[in-house]
Amino acid sequence: MITRGYYIGSIIDNLSQISMQIQTRVGLNLTDLNIYLENFCKELLNHIYSINLINLNQERSNEAGVDLGDAASKRAYQITSTKTLDKIKHTVDQSLANKDTYSDFFVLILQPKQRSYAIAEYANAVTLNFTEKNIIDFNDLSRDIVNLDLSKLEKIFNLVTKETSKVLIDLEIPHIDGTYQTNLNQYVETIPPIRFESANNLHQYIVGMDGTNDPFLDKNYLNTQLQELISKLKKLPKITRHILSYIFDNSEEDNGQLKLDFKKFKRSTSYKSVIEDFEILEKVQIFIYTESDNGNIISLIPYLGNNELSVTLQYFFQENNISVYDFFVNFDFSKI
């Protein structure tokens, strides 16, 4: 079981990475923030404080003094990488225009804030009831996160774990020539060489089954169907192909279809992003993901474009000791 300590430690570590990257950028006079980072902060604050902030800059370009607002809770936040007193005063001045909509204004500084701010006597701050407590950074958020219940911690952990790498890439510091350290090519998977000429062995197997009306007795038709399957597999990420190979290997025939109980799948793997992979597989029409009438059992129905081909392939693999992983993941079609 994942403990509170694990969630908290991971969340704080990731927020610290983001804060350090922003601090480095500010040191190089790179203070611009994009809408993606604002939206990350919006979701984070919503989870921590159970509010419903929206990004005001998406509705109106550069809303005066505030970036995020929740009219119901009357909270508003300015998200900034600049920690100076002048920046705080400027934000307070701009926020006066929104005092009828919001009553609590905060400035979230995305690098470590100053030890203190001489804001107590500033007239506009007094008008907004804005004090040093309204100036926060990730350290302040971390202190509040520590006191949250486990269900909230899990939601924040999932958010931060999923988004931190994207945020850090957005915050990368460009090289002198304007290029960036992160290059998409280092993340793009290389497609293995495809080894397929003709499904001679599979065709002989089908002929031996004596299926008089089997459309796959026509070798050209069989090869065409397999080439179509291969073209679909080429569109899939490696992890998605791996999931497909597991599903295919563990499915059982049911009324001419291969099915796998979703509960069985979940007990067999701790992989968390499987629903995204299911959506990818459905999009290329490799299987159907459906829920039964009672709503309790979810079946995976890999049909590979043709139910009969799915079942035949499974029997063929099993009887000839052919690796399903090699077929779907490594693109080794030489044995068929």
Image: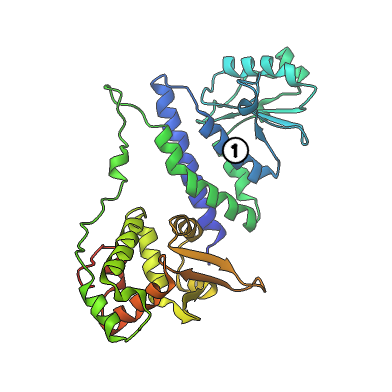
> Residue at coordinates 49% horizontally, 56% vertically from top-left?
279
Q: Is residue 85 above or below residue 19?
A: above
Percent position (x, y) of residue 242?
36, 64
> Residue at coordinates 59% horizontally, 42% vertically from top-left?
44
Crowd tier of the residue under label 1, counting other residues whose Cα lies within 10 Å: few below 14, some 14–19, many 20 or above: some
Residue with the mark numbered 1: 140
> Residue at coordinates 42% horizontally, 71% vertically from top-left?
247
**Which quadrant of the rendered structure holds the C terminus?**
bottom left
Give whichever of 214, 28 is nearer the camera.
Answer: 214
Q: Is residue 117 above or below residue 4?
A: above
Give whichever of 242, 24 is nearer the camera.
Answer: 242
Indicate the amino acid at tag 1. Answer: Asp
Is residue 333 in view from this perspective?
Answer: yes
Q: Is residue 70 above or below residue 221?
A: above
Percent position (x, y) of residue 253?
45, 81
Give whichever of 323, 97 is nearer the camera.
Answer: 323
Q: Secondary structure at mark 1?
A: helix
